Image (spheres, rainbow, N blue to C red):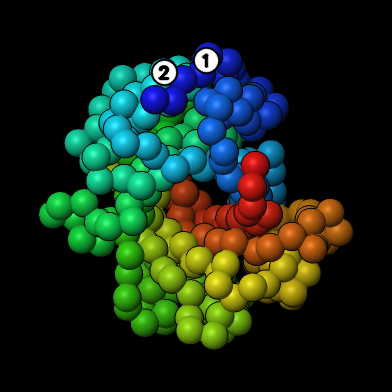
């Protein structure tokens, strides 16, 4: 069973604090970083840490939730699905948002399209917990773009998808009752670094008038490009998120 002490608190170092919690679990883990682009801003310092679940996934989920100080109301919707999960992901979005994701190698009963189920909550209690679904979609790319992504982001997303020989794996992300709705493209199989996709990533920055595109490439250009997500946020605003640097923690 996973165990660790609760050490999370709001602040710009939330990802480092969460890494400490995950390290305290005493199991090997993976790590991935991301930057979220919205109108006129780029928010970094985000991280995702991943562990394989053991023989009792429900107990592991509860122990992880305790380690993070997750409210019961955030974790409760995950519990009926825990037995079908293969991996658990811990997310940090500074300054105060924490996340727990279940990942399913085989879809849970009655949810054949479900790949991830995520609980998200504010450490400062500024908003109620949210539940997000990440569902596999096999529609054509143009249909997905039209339905899920703001039009100014279509061209760079289309260009990124074209870099994957067999096409990227696509997920639809929803977080009812909020207007959050987005498209997630998994580009790991394309084998790209951020530098390889520089033109497309800079185009995403320009489309949202977000700063820091070249700085991101200068600092992390050699690291693998993972997922790119784009859609509308909980506030209904266009956004794009670039996930990168996936590997051992």
**Mark 1 falls on what kind of element?**
loop
Q: Residue 81 is drawn in which quadrant? A: top left
Residue 78 locus on image (x, y percent): 28, 35
Residue 213 locus on image (x, y percent): 77, 59
Choose the circle earlier in sequence order: 2 or 1: 1
Residue 131 locus on image (x, y percent): 33, 39
The answer to which of 104 and 70 lies nearer the viewer is 104
Taking the image as shown, residue 165 lies to the left or right of residue 60, namely: right
Give the residue drawn at x 54%, y 33%.
Answer: 27
188 versus 160 height, above or below? above
Q: Residue 219 is drawn in which quadrant? A: bottom right
Contact flag, marks 2 and 1 (Cβ < 8 Å): yes
Asked whether residue 75 appears in the rendered view, the answer is no
Give the residue drawn at x 78%, y 69%.
Answer: 195
Q: Residue furthest front?
A: 55
Q: Residue furthest left?
A: 110
Q: Residues within 10 Å of mark 2 (few under 14, many from 20)?
A: some
Give the residue drawn at x 48%, y 84%.
Answer: 166
Indicate which disc residue 6 carries.
1
**Mark 2 falls on what kind of element?**
helix
The answer to which of 18 and 238 lies nearer the viewer is 18
Taking the image as shown, residue 136 lies to the left or right of residue 198, namely: left
Quadrant assignment for the C terminus: top right
Indicate which disc residue 78 carries.
none
89 versus 211 height, above or below? above
Q: Residue 20 is drawn in which quadrant? A: top right
188 versus 82 height, above or below? below
Quadrant assignment for the N terminus: top left
Q: Residues within 10 Å of mark 1 (few under 14, many from 20)?
A: some
Residue assigned mark 2: 66
Give the residue drawn at x 55%, y 27%.
Answer: 26
């Amino acid at each position: 069973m996973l165990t660790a002490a609760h050490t999370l608190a709001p602040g710009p170092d939330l990802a480092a604090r969460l890494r400490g919690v995950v390290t305290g679990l005493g199991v090997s883990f993976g790590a991935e970083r991301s930057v979220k682009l919205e109108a006129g801003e780029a928010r970094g310092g985000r991280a995702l840490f991943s562990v394989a679940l053991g023989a009792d996934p429900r107990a592991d989920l509860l122990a992880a939730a305790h380690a993070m100080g997750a409210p019961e109301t955030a974790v409760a919707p995950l519990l009926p699905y825990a037995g079908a999960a293969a991996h658990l992901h811990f997310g940090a979005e500074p300054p105060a948002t924490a996340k727990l994701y279940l990942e399913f190698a085989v879809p849970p009963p009655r949810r054949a399209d479900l790949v991830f189920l995520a609980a998200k909550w504010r450490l400062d209690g500024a908003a109620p917990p949210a539940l997000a679904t990440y569902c596999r979609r096999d529609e054509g790319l143009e249909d997905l773009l039209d339905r899920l992504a703001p039009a100014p982001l279509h061209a760079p997303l289309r260009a990124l998808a074209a870099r994957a020989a067999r096409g990227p794996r696509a997920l639809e992300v929803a977080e009812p009752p909020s207007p959050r709705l987005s498209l997630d493209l998994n580009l790991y199989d394309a084998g790209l670094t951020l530098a390889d996709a520089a033109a497309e990533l800079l185009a995403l920055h320009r489309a949202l008038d977000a700063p820091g595109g070249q700085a991101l490439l200068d600092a992390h250009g050699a690291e693998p490009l993972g997922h790119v997500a784009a859609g509308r946020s909980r506030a209904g605003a266009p956004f794009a998120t670039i996930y990168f640097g996936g590997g051992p923690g």
